[in-house]
Image (cartoon, rainbow, N blue to C red):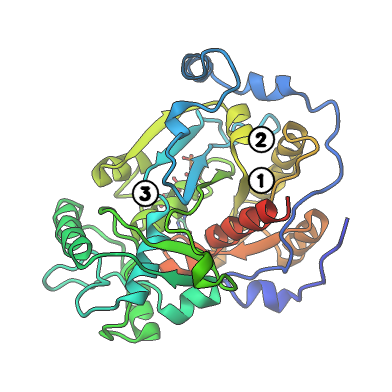
Amino acid sequence: MEMLPQATATELSGNPAGGTLPHHECVGPEADQDTSLETLQSITTEDEMKECSTEKGGEEAEPESFGHSTLALEISLNSSGLEEAPAGIHRKKGFAFNCEHVNFPLCECVARAANPRPNHGRLGRRPGRRSHRGPTLATLRDIGLEVFDETEESDFQESETETENLLADTTDAESDYTAGLESDVEGAVGGDDPNQLAPPSTTGQRRASIVTADSRRDDISPSPEPIKVAVFGTDGVGKSALIVRLLTGRFIGEYDPTLEAVMDTAGHVEVVEVGRERQVSWGEGFMLVFSLTSHDSFTSLNHLRRVILELTPGSPRPMVLVGNKADLVHAREVSDEEIRDLANTWGCDYFEVAAPEPWQVVVRPFAAIYQAVLNGRASH
Ligand SMILES: Nc1nc2c(ncn2[C@@H]2O[C@H](COP(=O)(O)OP(=O)(O)OP(=O)(O)O)[C@@H](O)[C@H]2O)c(=O)[nH]1
C-alpha cells in the first residue's frame, strides 16, 4: 500500500479548517476474516432488518428509497452500531437519509457563483439578524469545483421566497459561538459583497452541475450522476451536525436536537432506517467521522473500517477520515500524531472540521469524497 507523505503536526493542528493528506484511496490491510457479517447482522435491529427485507423484497437489490436518479450526491448516515464500541458509546439505530436535494448545496453555490446577484446568497436573512454566508467562487475553486449554470432567474426568485418562508419558521435560538463564526466568515469573505455565495438553500429546483476543475464545458452533463456517500462514526461525533450544515447551512446545537427535526422542517428529506450492512454495500464512498474530543470515537473507527473492507471485498472504495469538533480545543483527546499515523496507515485524506465552522470548511470532506468517487468511476 502506498504510504502518505508525513504531515507535520502543524499541518494537522494548525489548520482546523481542513488539514488534508494528499491521498484518496483508503485501502488498508485485509480485514480479519473473523470479523464476519454476523457482526453486522447482530448490530442491526429487528426493525431495520424488517424494513430492509420489505423494501428489498428479500433481495440485495438497491431499495427504491435510494433510487433518485437526479442526485449528485446521496448520503447515508449511520450511528455507531460498532460491535467493539467502547463502553460509554451507546449504539443506536442507523439512519439513512435519502436526500433528494443533497446535491443542492454544491449545485446552488455553483449556480450562484456563475450568476451572482445582490441579495441572493443569503440564507436566514431576517431583520436585525446576521445572514449566513457561503463560499466565494474562489473558495469553490479551492475545493476543486467549477461552474456550470443552467439556472433560470425564476428559479432563484422562487427559491429565495421559499427559503425565507422556511427560515421564518425556524428557531430564533442560535449559539453565540455560531453567530461569532458567521460574523467571522462575513469578514473573511467580503461582507456585503454581492459576489458572495450562499450556503445551501433547502428548496428549489436546480439545473446546475458540479464538475471537476479540469473538465471542459463541452463535456459537462447538466445531470451529474449521483454518488452515494455513507457517513459513519460513533454516537455524538457530529455526523448529523455536519450533514445538516452541508444541507442547510445551519448548525444544529442543543436547541435543535435531532437531524430528523431539521430535515422535517426542510421538508424534502425522507428518513429511512436501514441496517449497516446495507449502508456499506450501498455506499460508493465513506466518510469516517470521529470527534476530536473523544478518543474512543477515534479508536472505534478501526473496527468500522475493517467491517467496511470485509463487506466490499475486491472493490475498495474511497474513504476520508474526518475529525470533528475542532472548535472544542480544550476538550481535545486525540493528538495530531495519532491522527497522522492512522491516516498514513489507511492512506486516506484527513479533514479536521467543526460543524459550526463556515460552510465552505464543512463542505470540504464531502467534496473530497465526491471527487474521489468520481475519479474511481473514471478509472474503471
Ligand atoms: N461544539 C461542537 N459541537 C458539535 C459539533 N458537531 C456536533 N456537535 C454537537 O454534538 C452533539 C452531537 O452531534 P450529532 O450531530 O447529533 O452527532 P451524531 O454523530 O449524529 O450522533 P448520533 O445521532 O448519536 O449518531 C450535538 O449536541 C451537536 O450540537 C462541533 O463540531 N462542535
Farthest residue in the front direction?
218
Location of the N terminus by quadrant is bottom right
Q: Earlier in the sequence, mark 3 or mark 1?
A: 3
Q: Judge from the rendering whether residue 344 lies leftward or rightward of residue 189; answer left or right.
A: right
* SS assignment at label 2: loop
Relative to 159, is 31 above or below?
above
Q: CA distance from mark 3 to mark 2?
A: 32 Å
Which mark, residue 296?
Answer: 1
Identified by mark 1, the residue type is Asp
Residue lying farthest to the left in this orientation: 127
Element type where label 1 sits in the image: helix
Q: Is residue 17 visible?
A: no
Q: Please, what secondary structure does the residue beneath circle 3 have?
A: loop
Mark 3 lies on residue: 101
Location of residue 81 with respect to 161 vertically, above or below: above
Mark 3 or mark 2: which is in front? Answer: 3
Residue 166: horizontal and vertical position, in percent? 18, 52
- Left or right of residue 310, residue 63 in this image: left
Q: Amino acid at mark 2?
A: Ala
The numbered disc on residue 85 is 2
Left or right of 213, for residue 98? left
Q: Are marks 2 and 1 in contact (CB under 8 Å)?
A: yes
Q: Position of residue 346 (x, y in %)?
A: 78, 54
Badge 2, how many Cα within 10 Å: few under 14, some, many 20+? many
Query: Of callouts 2 and 1, which one flags the residue occurring earlier in the amino acid sequence?
Result: 2
- Cα separation, mark 3 vs mark 1, equals 33 Å
Q: Nearer the viewer, residue 44 or 139?
A: 139
CA gap between label 2 and label 1 equals: 8 Å
Instruction: Report the amino acid beneath label 3.
Output: His
Q: CB of mark 3 within 8 Å of CB of mark 2?
A: no
Q: Is residue 163 above or below residue 113?
A: above
